[in-house]
Image (cartoon, rainbow, N blue to C red):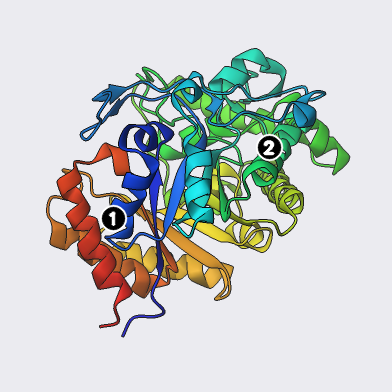
Amino acid sequence: MMSKAPECAMYVYPWDVIDQGAESLSDELAEIGIRTLSIASSYHAGHFVQPRGKRRRTYFPEDGVVYFEPSSRLWQNAEISPRPAAQLAEGNALRDLIVLRDRGGLAVSCWTVCLHNTRLGLRHPGHVTRNAFGDPNVYSLCPSSPAARQYARHLVSDLVTQFGPDCIEIETPGFMRFTHGYHHEKDGLGLTAKQEFLLSICFCEHCRTRAAAQHVDAENAASSVRRILDAAFATETPAHDDGEFGEVGYAALDNASGLSAYLALRGRTVSTLIGELRDEIAGRSRLMIITEPQSWREGIDLAAASLASDGIATLGYGQTPKELAAMLAGMRELIGPAKELAVALRPFVPEISQAPAFTDLAVAAVQGGASRLHFYNYGLIPASRLKWIAAAVQAATVPS
């Protein structure tokens, strides 16, 4: 017997809502058991194949824009402020879904990419993350930066005040990884998982200021990272010294001088930002944090993040049903029984090749402790594959 039936949501892009029509799209998804539409309200660049697109079959969204008109009053004195998408000239998808919701339609969640913003990073290089060598990561605003934190707070406040969504799902509230799919990413060295993580640790001036205030030696930690990476950069072939790094995370770095205290500070930086976002919402909406299964890579402490929010949304991609259930059971143990635990599943080929395999994943997710199933993504799959989602929803929401 499975636990309580999960709520089911679908991730959608604004351009898909406009192409299909808000009412038509909502009706189509309601028929297969979807109860929430999670629409991108702040998003990054990409190149998407649109199998069911009526106006476009491929699409390059603008980088680092928001899909609503920001409040001029709220942002007038902000150092970092958002840019509304040009696509709004075609229609305001978020507003249309909220109108339908208020008439008794599907719930609406604002899927909000937070600190991952190359447009803003290029415009505000003093507020991006920087590695131990001082090199900037222009795609990632730093959660230690006061201006970046204000940007994040204003973003959720603007959404809640203007639209009153049922939930805000925050993606990238922490320190982004070095490897994340940036345009034409190149690595001829062959970075190991440990080396990639070390290259992801931020030592910008804002992180160093926070460290000094808490009596943590940032330069000692940075020196340790540089020493390890310089040795790696000098090798002819990669030294696969990861050991249990992927499983135990920070514990695998305990022997690196000065890193433990610095990495703990990193986690507190993100947890306090999440708390600030929760305070900004002030009970007007639910707040969920989207993170990868190994959230510590982004400086996200699952237990602390769940305490500062209404729950966690994680990714269930590329896993077997057994692996997915075990991962979610571990996360459920960390965050406790009262918090929401969502998992995103995607019916992408060749990752999933048949409907029964997708159903097995959905059932395993619920058995592992997921209270919500989030399906990714309406516009990226052919219409016929909605039947896979329908079958998964049916199997996961009806007790066996």
Of the numbered discs 2 and 1, the one sitting upstream in the chain is: 2
Query: Where does residue 209 sit, x and y in percent of width and height?
Result: 82, 32
Give the percent coordinates (x, y) of residue 277: 71, 48
Residue position marked by numbered label 2 in the rendering: 152
Residue 378 or 315: which is nearer the viewer? 378
Q: Can residue 4 be seen in this snapshot? A: yes
Amino acid beneath label 2: Ala
Q: At 40% from the left edge and 28% from the top edge, which residue is drawn?
A: 181
Q: Nearer the viewer, residue 274 or 260?
A: 274
Can you tell which quarter of the image residue 134 is in? top right
Q: Quadrant of the N terminus?
A: bottom left
Q: Amino acid at mark 1?
A: Gln
Q: CA distance from mark 2 to mark 1?
A: 32 Å
Q: Would you place residue 65 above or below residue 2 in this image?
A: above
Residue sitting farthest toward the front: 103
Residue labelled with disc 1: 319
Left or right of 313: which side holds 382?
Answer: left
